[in-house]
């Protein structure tokens, strides 16, 4: 059974992951996108950020549902 504390910690970790990905993507962009591989890596960053935001949305929704079930 998932506790509310676990869900909150999970959401914080996923939020930190998303922020970290954005920071690394900005660093990557500032180095330049001259090569073809750099553009592929940028696309991978974008996909990972979208994945992290989807997981964060799911985690926040499950925290809300957990709170609604307890009331």
Image: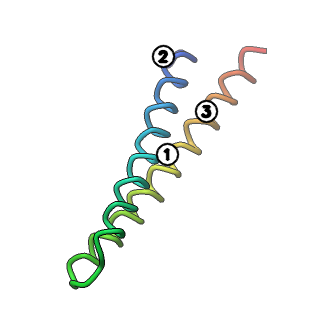
From this view, report whether residue 17 is shown above or below residue 42.
Answer: above
Q: Nearer the viewer, residue 41 or 33?
A: 33
Residue at the image point whose x is 40% and y is 64% from the top: 47
Q: Which image quarter is the C terminus in?
A: top right
Q: Nearer the viewer, mark 3 or mark 1?
A: 1
Q: Secondary structure at mark 2?
A: loop
Q: CA distance from mark 1 to mark 2?
A: 19 Å
Query: Where's residue 52, x and y in %?
Result: 45, 49
> In this figure, which residue is indicated by the disc labeled 3?
62
- Upstream in sequence: badge 3 or badge 2: 2
Q: Secondary structure at mark 1?
A: helix
Q: Nearer the viewer, residue 53 or 61?
A: 53
Residue at the image point whose x is 45% and y is 38% from the top: 16
The outermost residue toward the right is: 71
Q: Nearer the viewer, mark 1 or mark 2?
A: 1
> In this figure, which residue is indicated by the disc labeled 1?
55
Q: CA distance from mark 3 to mark 1?
A: 10 Å
> In this figure, which residue is indicated by the disc labeled 2?
1
């Amino acid at each position: 059974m998932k506790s509310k504390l676990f869900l909150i910690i999970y959401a914080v970790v996923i939020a930190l992951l998303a922020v970290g990905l954005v920071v690394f993507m900005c660093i990557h962009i500032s180095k330049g996108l001259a090569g073809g591989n750099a553009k592929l890596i940028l696309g991978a960053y974008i996909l990972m950020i979208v994945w992290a935001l989807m997981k964060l949305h799911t985690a926040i929704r499950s925290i809300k549902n957990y709170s609604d079930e307890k009331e």
